[in-house]
Amino acid sequence: MMKKNSWLTLVSVALLLAILMTSTACAKPAEATGEDLMEGVQGEEVTVQKDYVEEHQEALLNFSMDFFREAHKEEGGNVLLSPVSLMSALGMTGNGALENTLKEMEAVFGLSMEELQNLLYLYNTSLPKEDGMAVHMANSIWFKEGGSISVQPEFLTKNATYYDAGIYQAPFDDTTVTAINNWVKEKTKDRIEEILDEIPEDALMYLINALSFDGQWMKKYSEGQVGEGVFVNAQGIEENVKMMRSEEGLYVEDEEVYGFMKPYEGGEFLFMALLPKAEESLEALLSRYTGSALKALLENKQVATVYTAMPKFTTEFEMEASDAFKALGMKDAFDSDRANLKALGTSPIGNLYIGRILHKTFMEVNEQGTKAGAVTAVEVVAESAAMDPKTVELNRPFLYMIVDTKSHLPLFLGAMESIEE
């Protein structure tokens, strides 16, 4: 695990590293060739009601909070996750899962794979791309050349339908590392220049999802609203910070937390920051704060004058997320004997199972707005109303998130325990 602050433009790349190998043969597989295998593969027409995401809010928020709780327990400090990135990465992987491997994945999300993919399809196809507020996602799948892997046609069709993924054949040498990194750099608008430093010898496939977020505040901070401030970190040490002060109009509160919302241009996304009411650590709060509680909080926002203070910050986070998923009950997918990813494809080398799930995120919050991004890599290996004014000052550890105003799905979810870290 690595965490550090850096002066970065924030972007996200969700990367599923998949080393695909299996000993059994599948009927009528599609062989990896030099051309884009998605060419000519038509995705099925998807009809999803616009309120479909809202109907499944609680499941989405429960996964978001459950996974965040496990990640914060394991990593501590300035954790920053992208639930959307994680769901997209595992959703693509789930297209190749069968039997108990699939059941455990669905149980973690509280949704069937069909429900999850319908949600992601509707969400991804409705993302804003206007000046002042833009979210971009792209997908690609890369196969090793030489006929070492065959992919089930149904797997390709699902990826065409739900992810619009391009599929390419490559030698999986240094030239492929360069090609994949160039793809990532292009899709993230030059904000992430490299996601791979090398490709393991037994790697057969990479599934990559790239995501970038750019949001300008609906009400930007003026020069006079930014000044010196003090942030007391999780260790009780004072840190000198640049504090941004403003008057906002949306307040949230329940028995455990209180905070405010600050909208981005277009009104489709909000930044929400929360402080624990009790004098306790964020980990103590997270141990009992549920997705259902977050859903109720989001649904009961109040119109009020809120005097706010928020530190400028740039943060970067990276973790290996396998243990967190195992703790939530997804176990067979990581077991070399019990994993069943045969719906994805076959190889003569060995049985498929997930080796690692890598997650990386970036976020910068300043006077103009927010830029953010995330990388999720799943590595599949083979054996082989009128109220009194409120005040919310983020001068101690706080939770924060970027939330879709319609679905309430957190695009990003973070804990800030130290600005200088």
Image (cartoon, rainbow, N blue to C red):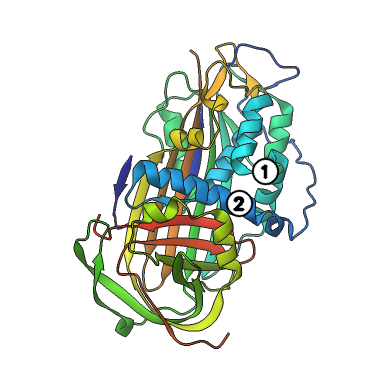
**Of residues 160 and 255, the one drawn nearer to the viewer in this rendering:** 255
Residue for point 56% across, 20% down = 352
Q: Position of residue 204 (x, y in %)?
A: 53, 23
Looking at the rendering, which quadrant does residue 153 occupy? Answer: top right
Q: CA distance from mark 1 to mark 2?
A: 9 Å
**Of residues 306 and 381, the one drawn nearer to the viewer in this rendering:** 306
Q: Position of residue 118 (x, y in %)?
A: 71, 48
Q: Is residue 28 left or right of residue 11?
A: right
The disc at residue 111 is: 1
| Residue where numbered disc 2 is placed | 60
Q: Secondary structure at mark 2?
A: helix
* Residue 45 visible in the snapshot: yes
Residue for point 56% across, 40% down = 89
Mark 1: which amino acid?
A: Leu
Residue for point 74% across, 60% down = 50
Q: Crowding near pointer 2: few (<14 within 10 Å), some, many (20+)?
A: many
Pointers 1 and 2 in contact (CB under 8 A)?
Answer: yes
Mark 2: which amino acid?
A: Leu
Looking at the rendering, which quadrant does residue 181 occupy? Answer: top left
Q: Crowding near pointer 1: few (<14 within 10 Å), some, many (20+)?
A: some
Name the N-terminal-most of marks 1 and 2: 2
**Of residues 387 and 159, the one drawn nearer to the viewer in this rendering:** 387
Q: Position of residue 347 (x, y in %)?
A: 60, 15
Q: Position of residue 182 (x, y in %)?
A: 45, 42
Q: Secondary structure at mark 1?
A: loop
How many numbered marks have been drawn onto this rendered protein structure? 2
**Of residues 122 and 181, the one drawn nearer to the viewer in this rendering:** 122
- Above or below residue 200? Residue 358 is below
